[in-house]
Image (spheres, helix red, strand yellow):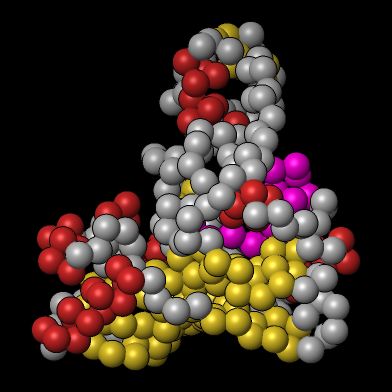
């Protein structure tokens, strides 16, 4: 195994970070400086000088335009996340966040979890819109984390994908891992974690298909990666191989992917609850264009 790939797994770091360490001559095998593309061998003595830990990320309480609270009680806050908003702060991200927006609007959330992720029990991509839940009470945080881990949450997404998936209803069962060359991407790889996506085509157009997706697992970029692997990337998802000309024609400036519905047992009452998010204007308009084209 290459040095960058092997040490990334051993240390739990990205390959980009490990490559930077190797480029600084801070990786030695049996006392010899090695590069990121050199090979690890069984029984060798590894010496790695790690960089200083990054500065802690803080939550900036601000007003976030378009962040709508669908429901709130003593245990949970259900929000409709707009495009261009991250769920929580992270290194390198300077834009608005859901947790910052909730803090800016005076909402209290659970203190469980890392400082910048308090109350967060699941995430949506920056470019993905739709419904998500944040824990307010500590008991709700524990219950919801367990529910997501045990896959008892019903996560329904709507997407428009290029072409026509065959069959029109099926399951994509393919493990996902970080992309071996591009740290910001993920890919279907044998080394990845189990990832299962159920889908059904609801409408078929000449250039694309409107699909409903139920996630059994919740890997980063799972829907985007799985449909890209089938050669049917989400319309507008240039990161995963979408056709830019189709996106431009439909007026889509990001992936056509929306968290439509979220169902779970309420952590306070035990009752099954379901929350739904309407399509934002840009997605609704592009869907209508496809229907008009036929």
Q: Give how far across and how far down residue 209 sits, in percent.
A: 26, 81
Residue occupying image coordinates x 76% and y 83%: 265
Residue depicted at 71% across the width and 72% down the height = 72
Q: Quadrant for residue 116, please give it.
A: top right
Count of labels shown? Answer: 0
Q: Position of residue 130 (x, y in %)?
A: 49, 70
Q: Nearer the viewer, residue 102 or 88?
A: 102
**Residue 232 shows up from this direction:** no
Looking at the picture, tell me which residue is in the foreground, 264 or 103: 103
Question: Position of 119 compared to 261: left or right?
Answer: right
Residue at image coords 72%, 58%: 107
Q: How far across and how far down the image is residue 146, in percent?
A: 79, 69
Q: Locate the C terminus by quadrant.
A: bottom left
Q: Which residues are magenta?
A: 113-126
Magenta stretch: dominant SS?
loop
In this picture, residue 270 sits left or right of residue 22: right
Q: Compared to 151, does 243 lie above or below?
A: above
Q: Based on the displayed image, in which of its 4 quarters is residue 60 positioned?
A: top right
Question: Does the magenta portion include 124?
Answer: yes
In the rendered image, the vertical position of residue 17 relative to residue 174, given as above or below? above
Name the outermost residue toward the right.
139
Is residue 243 shown in magenta? no
Q: Is residue 67 above or below residue 286?
A: above
Measuring from the top left, give residue 225's x and y in whole percent: 41, 62
């Amino acid at each position: 195994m290459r040095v960058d790939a092997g040490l990334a797994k051993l240390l739990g770091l990205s390959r980009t970070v490990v490559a930077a360490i190797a480029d600084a001559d801070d990786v030695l095998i049996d006392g010899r400086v090695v590069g990121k593309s050199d090979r690890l061998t069984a029984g060798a003595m590894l010496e790695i000088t790690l960089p200083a830990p990054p500065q802690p990320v803080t939550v900036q309480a601000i007003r976030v335009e378009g962040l709508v609270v669908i429901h709130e009680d003593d245990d949970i806050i259900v929000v409709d996340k707009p495009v261009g908003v991250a769920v929580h702060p992270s290194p390198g991200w300077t834009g608005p966040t859901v947790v910052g927006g909730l803090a800016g609007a005076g909402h209290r959330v659970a203190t469980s979890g890392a400082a910048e992720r308090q109350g967060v029990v699941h995430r949506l991509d920056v470019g993905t819109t739709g419904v998500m839940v944040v824990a307010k009470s500590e008991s709700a945080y524990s219950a919801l984390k367990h529910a997501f881990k045990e896959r008892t949450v019903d996560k329904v997404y709507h997407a428009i994908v290029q072409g026509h998936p065959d069959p029109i209803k099926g399951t994509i069962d393919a493990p996902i891992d970080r992309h071996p060359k591009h740290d910001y991407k993920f890919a279907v790889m044998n080394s990845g974690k189990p990832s299962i996506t159920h889908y059904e085509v609801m409408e078929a157009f000449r250039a694309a298909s409107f699909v409903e997706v139920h996630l059994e697992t919740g890997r980063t970029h799972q829907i985007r990666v799985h449909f890209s692997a089938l050669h049917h990337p989400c319309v507008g998802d240039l990161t995963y191989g979408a056709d830019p000309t189709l996106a431009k024609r439909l007026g889509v400036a990001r992936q056509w992917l929306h968290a439509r519905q979220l169902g779970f047992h309420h952590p306070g009452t035990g009752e099954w609850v379901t929350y739904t998010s309407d399509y934002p204007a840009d997605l609704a308009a592009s869907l209508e264009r496809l229907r008009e084209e036929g």
